[in-house]
Amino acid sequence: MRKTTVTTDISEAATQLLEGGIIGFPTETVYGLAGIIDSETAISTIFRVKGRPSDNPLIVHIAHPSQLDDVAAEVPELAWQLSSALWPGPLTMLLKKRSSIPDAITAGRETVAVRMPAHPAALALLSAIGQPVAAPSANPFGCISPSQAQHVLKYFDGKIPLILDGGPCQVGIESTIVGFDGPNIIIYRHGSVTAAQIAAVTDARCIYKQSGPKVVAPGMFPRHYAPVTPLLFSNNIQELAQLHSGKKIGLLHYGEHFSSNDIVASYSLSSSDSMEEAAANLYSALHKLDNYGLDLILVKEFPMEGIGIALNDKLKRASYQQ
Ligand code: AMP
Ligand code: MG
C-alpha cells in the first residue's frame, strides 16, 4: 500500500470509509481503527491489521442515540436513560444485537457494543457517512493505545490509507463498558465514566464484573495496553527504584516525585494533581518512555477513586508479566 495520508479533511475520510477502506480516526477516549459495519472486507481488514483475535468483538460507533434502534434489537429503559445523560461520551453499552449486525463484529455474540463518541471530528465523520462504523482502538493487539494521530501512524504507516487527525484525545483512556441485567447495570470495563456517575442518573445498582476464566471484553485480558519496556506499578515507587538500582529507570509520576542516579527519564502526568489530566497524558507518556531503551518504567498507583480506578486497572494490565 502507498503512504498513509494524515489529514483533517472529514470528507476525504468519509470517502475512504464509504469505499470500504479502514481509517484511523479520533475519539475523545483513544484513536480508533474504523470501517463501515456492512463491509465484510473492511471488518476483516481491521482484525488482520490489528492482529486482533477474531473472538474479540468491536465497538460500533454511532452519530446519534436515535441510531441505537438500527443496531440493537432491544434497548432497555436504563440504556435510554444512560444515553440521554452521558452521551456523547466515553460510555459503551452492550445490547442485544439486531440480526443485521454481522457476526464478525460481535465475534458471534448475541450482544453488540455501541457508543456515541464525544469528539467533534468523529461525530462530523459519522454524520457525513450516515451509518455506523465498527472500531476497536488503533493499536496492534496488546500494545499501548494511541492517543494522538502520530501514534496511529507509528503503528500502521503504509498499512492503512488514511488517518483523520483530531489532535490529542481529551479523555485519553478507553470507554467504560456496561451491560444490563434487569434492574442492574454491570460494569465490564472501568473507564472515565464512573459507577457513581451512572448511579447518579439511573436507579440501577452497579455491579463490577471481575474478569473470569472466559474473557468478556478484551480490555479484561490480564496483559493489555502494555509498553515493550517492562513496567512496574506500586504504591511505593521509591522502594521499587531502590530494589532495581543499577537499571535504567523511567518514571511516570503523579503527585509524589523524587530523583536518583538510576532515573534517566521522568514525566509528570499532571501539573495540577488532576487524575483527569493524568489520564489524558498517560498513553502518550508511555509511548515516549518506550522509545528510550529503558530497562524499566515505574508508575505510582493512583488513589482508588473516580477515574483512578480505571487508571490503576490499565496499569495493572500494562505491568502484567506472563
Ligand atoms: P477496544 O476498542 O480495542 O478497547 O476494544 C473494544 C472493546 O469493546 C473490547 O474490550 C471488546 O471486548 C468490547 N466489546 C465489543 N463488543 C462486545 C460484546 N458484544 N460483548 C462484550 N464486549 C464487547
Ligand atoms: Mg483496545
Image (cartoon, rainbow, N blue to C red):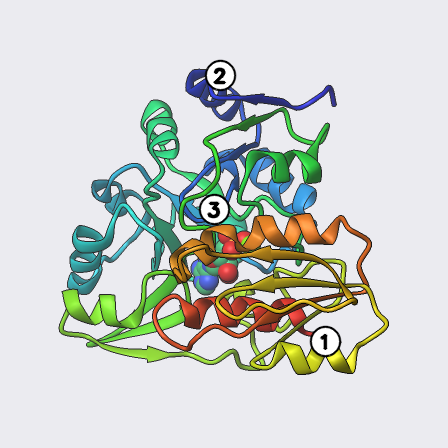
The residue singled out by tag 2 in the image is 12
Which quarter of the image is occupied by the N terminus?
A: top right
Residue 195 visible in the shown view? yes
Q: Are marks 2 and 3 in contact (CB under 8 Å)?
A: no
68 or 270: nearer the viewer: 270
Which badge, 3 or 1, comes first in the chain's sequence? Answer: 3
Q: Residue at x 27, y 45 (%)?
A: 88
Q: Position of residue 72 (x, y in %)?
A: 30, 52
Is label 2 or label 3 in front? Answer: 2
The Cα atoms of the two marked residues, 2 and 1, are separated by 48 Å
Q: Is residue 85 above or below residue 12?
A: below
Residue 145 seen from this side: no
Give neighbour class at mark 3: few <14, some 14-19, many 20+ (Cα, 10 Å): some
Which three-letter amino acid code belongs to the residue tagged 1? Ala
Mark 1 element type: helix
3D distance between C-alphas at marks 3 and 1: 49 Å
Disc 2, SS? helix
N-terminal of the pair, mark 2 or mark 3, is: 2
Query: 146 and 84: which one is in front?
Result: 146
Image quarter (top left, top right, bottom left or bottom right) of the C terminus: bottom right
In the shown orientation, is residue 269 left or right of residue 285? left
- Tag 3, which secondary structure? loop
Q: Amino acid at mark 3?
A: Pro
At x 38%, y 37%, the residue is: 132
| x, y percent for residue 244 | 79, 77
Indicate the amino acid at tag 2. Answer: Glu
Q: Which residue is mark 1?
A: 241
Residue underneath mark 3: 102
Residue 146 x %, y %: 57, 45
Q: Going by the image, does 92 lie left or right of 153?
A: left
